[in-house]
Amino acid sequence: MSVLERINSPADIRNMGIDELECVCAEIREFIIATVARTGGHLASSLGVVELTIVLHYVFNTPFDKIIWDVGHQAYAHKIITGRCELFGSLRQQGGISGFPKRSESPYDTFDVGHSSTSISAATGMVEAASLHGEKERKVVAVIGDGAMTSGMALEALNWFGSRDRDITIVLNDNEMSISPNVGAISYYLNRIMTGHGTLRARAEIKKMLSSIPRIGDRVIEFSKNVEDSLKSIFIPGGFFQDLGYTYVGPLDGHRLENLLKNFSNIRNMKGPVLVHVVTKKGKGYAPAEAQPHKFHGVGAFDITSGLPCSASTKPSFSKVFGDTLREIARLDERVVAITAAMAEGTGLDGFAQEFPKRFFDVGIAEQHAVTFAAALALEGFRPVVAIYSSFLQRSYDQILHDVCLQNLPVVFALDRGGFVGDDGPTHHGVFDLSYLRTIPNIVIMAPKDEGELRHMLYTALESPCPVSIRYPRGVGAGANINENLRHLEIGKAEVLREGRDVAIFAIGSPVAAALDAAEKLKKRGVSVSVINSRFVKPLDVALIKEMALATKRLITVEENALNGGFGSAVVEFLADSGVTEVAVKRLGIGDEFYPHASQAYLKALCRIDAEAIVATALEMLEF
């Protein structure tokens, strides 16, 4: 029996010696690599924190003591040793365990996470709750990455709690990366000459040199330990955190298990706010991930020996088509600039960054800043394109409304991952953007039916004098023609793809393909269907909607977005406001609930936005 097989909870590791714990770490790494190679997942981050995870659960009395993992990309080892080892093979699979901490799964998952930089705020709330409950012995730990620490939310919480007379332990996991390489002054601060890996190497080299000095070497080392604390504030980044009210500890080597155990055993008894700076290596233990941690941040199934994906589509992804098209336009228009929030590769902007480094801005995990920054660029005559995942743009709603749309500035929002994202689950499904943007004045909202139309929409958006949002799905396209010359699309004008007399289907974005498939199936049943590629949620093609409503008396709207306030709602509102009442309307879209992690195809069928559901809806309306 392996050592790992004997672990059903953290209590099982607390009686182990250092040798057994080292074996546990090695086995966990092998297990994570083998599982993620089959299921896909967030590999590099979780490999980097194996020792840290073991130490935290060894030293702290979890689940009574609380550990909050920021984002959750680093929580696989945590899941394995908290009773989910046998379930780990179902990671991110339909009906299986989530890729992120989830309270419904385990009492050890103390807070549902998925978006960056929430851990310190959550931890401070738990500390204050423990105080109000009179639970003086409870310890609370937040584990946050160096990339997430650059977010305004993390800094707000850090700033507020530093003045509180409460115990908290904040572990800064410094692996020199979030997803894309970190940017900004805080990242620079953490990686100065006497921080991170440089500090640890320098300490080891100096100690080795001093030890070699006959007779006095050991005494010099002992003396240096005594003065180290007084020198620390001069040479390492503790000064910043200490000025905020935190006792700074570190930097500690995140892969020296015995050293971590000794330090955290002492840290557990420290009073007041404590920040522990731990240096780890993203992808630790798997050579391909160590060499290219950004490529192994989130991966699909891959071959362990080579590190290469098991399957790769020959069709380009929507993200790549977007990035390539933006470069094409930028070559002709020097006003075009690109902005992302620590997701250059994920949004397809890595090529733009290489070709136009002066016109590319990665602002780090700071979506609010990204939007207002773009507003100022637009005000000064540039044409900024802000590329952010749909679910992440939610964090900057006020800036979109107040700083961009209120001033009617020509900022283009490229919303990647619009719709269901699949295995990453409810924290990442981009199913609310049509609703949360539609209520804002001045903004134009588009969604392409395929990757070819995405190109024309981007071109159109960059010619428009107002804010524009373009949302498109995760993954590869249908193989549409992406070699056409770019052309302007008339704002607010839909495209009739198929004409029929019985039912009119108005689809927006990726569901257009399902609508066309449904029309073919209905034709075989003797039903004549019109299919409209709506293209625009705002402004609507109201003339065409009214024409089809009067002609067919039956409309179906289809969207991969929440029904509440979405595209279908806009159509119904128009019909009601314009007095068109003699028409039946069925809205297909995403219901008023959060949907789990599963394949995109499964989720579309579950929400009845696939071809079969459209066929069934049409037949029901026709009383077949």
Image: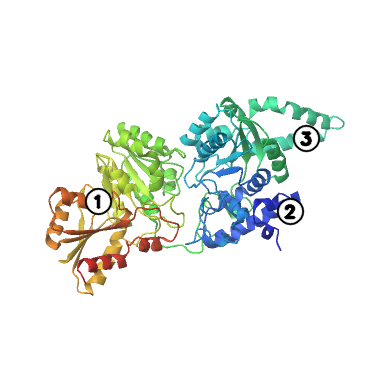
Q: Secondary structure at mark 1?
A: helix
**Residue at the far right in the pictured view:** 215
The answer to which of 595 and 491 lies nearer the viewer is 595
Give the mark, 2 or 3, whose residue is nearer the N terminus.
2
Give the mark, 2 or 1, whose residue is nearer the N terminus.
2
Residue density around tag 2, few if under 14, some if 14–19, many if 20 or more, within 10 Å = some
Tags 3 and 1 touching, CB below 8 Å: no
Q: Which residue is mark 1?
A: 569
Q: Is residue 233 shown above or below 68?
A: above
Picture coordinates of residue 109, whole percent (x, y): 55, 49
> Left or right of 531: which side holds 547?
left
CA gap between label 2 and label 3 equals 32 Å
Picture coordinates of residue 254, whole percent (x, y): 65, 43
Q: Quadrant of residue 264?
A: top right
> Left or right of 234: which side holds 120?
left
CA gap between label 2 and label 1 equals 60 Å
The answer to which of 11 and 235 lies nearer the viewer is 11
At label 1, which amino acid type do we have? Ser
Closer to the camera: disc 2 or disc 3? 2
Q: Is residue 373 shown above or below 89?
A: above
Q: Is residue 592 shown above or below 395?
A: below
